[in-house]
Image: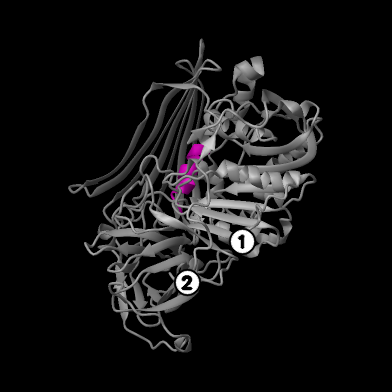
Amino acid sequence: MRYVTNLPHATKEEEHVTIPMSDGVRLSAHIWRPTSSDHEPVPAVLEYIPYRKRDLTAVRDSIHHPYLAGHGYACVRVDLRGTGDSEGVLRDEYLEREQADAEEVLAWLTEQPWCDGGAGMMGISWGAFAALQVAARQPPGLKAIAIASFTDDRHADDMHYMGGALLSDNLAEAGTMFAYGTCPPDPAVVGDRWREMWQERLEHTEPWVLQWLRHQRRDDYWRHASVCEDYSSVRCPVLASSGWADGYSNAVTRLLGHLDVPRKGLIGPWSHKFPHLGEPGPAIGYLQELVRWWDHWLKGVDNGVMDGPMLQAWMQDSVPPSTAYEERPGRWVGEPDWPSPHIRQDVHPLTRHTIGPPREPADEGNASDGDAMTVQSPLSVGQFAGKWASYNAPPDLPYDQREEDGGSLVFDSGPLTEPLEILGSPTVELDLSVSEPVALVAARLSDVSPDGSATRVSYGILNLTRRDSTESPEPLEPGRRYRATVPLNGVAQAFPPGHRVRLSLSTSYWPLAWPPPKPALLSVHEHSSTLTLPVRPVEEPDEVPASPFGEPEGTPPLATRQVTPPEERWEVKRDLIGYHSELDIVKDRGTVRFEDINMEAGRRARERYTAVADDFTSVSGESTWTMRFQRDDWDVRVVTHTQLTCDDTDFFVDATLDAYEADRRVFSRTWNERVPRDLL
């Protein structure tokens, strides 16, 4: 990244500004703005997240907010209610109170003498969720949003459930927020009230995984704040981005296809990162794109930002399987609209372990009945699946799929005689039967090289009890034939000549997805089951320059010093005496000293996923976090632990929350809860 110090506007910053809410709670904001805004008001750009602006996101914030401020914007970074230095308690994600607070923040911003009355919202992940959800509420003054790594559907396409199957990231993310939501504010900012504010958070927080497990169907809990319920509610321009390695690779194209506002889409090879910090690379000059976006929609500059294709996407070249990549080779392609007129849907019949050639349109619906192929997967299928949403640290992408394929039903194409490129969401339609009333199917699409190594390209999971409805699931009748469609995540992927396309089907995908109560035998009928590929013919023009974006740039990051080293670990362990298997993940940021505020902060997260043999009720997931903050004689620590287990009929949540001042424990609470399984 190129760090820029010479910007069009001199800037000033206010590190802690309180914004009053209508119920008396005060939120804490960090504001960067042009010095000239004292007498020449400018538009405001809001980022609204729960991840502690004063310390834990301070380095990241220092790269992009001063940069945008230096281009003529008042950038405002607000801690959500109950996080960082804001008052109150954060009780769950995306609540009505959270969104009402955001509207009040926007109203406050647009009334400030340094603001010209117009505002935008930006962010990644929670910040992007917040921006999209608030945009659907149409607050006065919100003129445009720029969002990265988000969803418009909280149930079907978030880290909680996928195809109605429970994701392990449901536990992992709950563990993250259990830790972040129980940290204290900084006494240097809030004064002597810090301990009272901390105690309120500790006393009124419960593990969010409990709430998320209590809603296993798509109900009003998930419909709330899911913009897909009414796309017409969004009436401001939207710049939407994500990465193919991210769990949120699907919502960009859905917004492009359903919104009726000026909109642009951008999908790179990245994990869960802003595009200017994108990993795997290449990262791009995203902040320059934001400046152009805001200049047009907040300042009325006619700069051509809406020219060119609606979607720009990184067409990924073939690579060997790896759990991490520094760069993903490929090229940018553009599509004028979405759905794109360039892309055709090729329907391939599945025959005996083979992906057949695409059917002609006249043959659609005329498939003959075929023999059944069967699979009952062991719990080991999925240990090399990687994370639902990759962060690229520790290395968390899927590894070589050959070992996974050994417990799967596999269909291969013949060696390709010419290049094949796909852009969009593949789908698998299955004519199937199962041996149990609750079962799932995981479908994986891989690029198989001539040496046999298999790189996963995309995947999808379906809880078969939700085959027709996630609102009203129904148990399966063992032996009865059903039709079920499994959508796979969107992707742009090039398959070279000599490679094969592989589809793999399994009945477990642990620990990425929680297994059903019992192993199920899946029968798939050939000929009447199909794989549909969204083919972008290679002769189509790319529609974009070879290098449509500038080099990543930002302002110099905040000065910090690494006091203790970070640690990253991703280990798969198997005991062949007791048949115990384990995935052990450690993400320890070490201790970092923030020189400007004389503080040291440390974060350590550990996840463990275990199982015994093929006992589907033996699976267990654990999330343990330690958060520590220290300055002079102020030394505080929060330790959270959440364990999720099950039997045939119930989930069990056992959790602890401990808080310490120095080495003295000042708070402790334990939860032991049972949540019934609902066809899950």
Residue on which the image places disc 1: 256
Q: Is residue 274 visible?
A: no
Residue 187 drawn at (x, y percent): 61, 17
Which residue is rendered at x = 48% and y = 67% of the image?
A: 465
Q: Nearer the viewer, residue 402 or 212?
A: 402
Q: Where are the magenta residues, as a range?
A: 167-177
In this view, the residue farthest toward the left is: 577
Residue 216 drawn at (x, y percent): 54, 56
Q: Residues within 10 Å of mark 2 (few under 14, many from 20)?
A: some
Q: Is residue 409 visible?
A: yes
Residue on which the image places disc 2: 485
* Kind of residue at disc 1: Leu
* Side of 542 where 615 appears, left or right: left
Rounded to the nearest angstrom, the CA distance separating label 1 from label 2 is 23 Å
Tell me which numbered mark, 1 or 2, is placed earlier along the sequence: 1
Which residue is rendered at x = 53% and y = 15% of the image?
A: 598
Q: Secondary structure at mark 2?
A: strand
Q: Quadrant of residue 643?
A: top left
* Kind of residue at disc 2: Thr
Residue 287 drawn at (x, y percent): 58, 41
Residue depth check, mark 1 versus mark 2: number of the one nearer the observer: 1
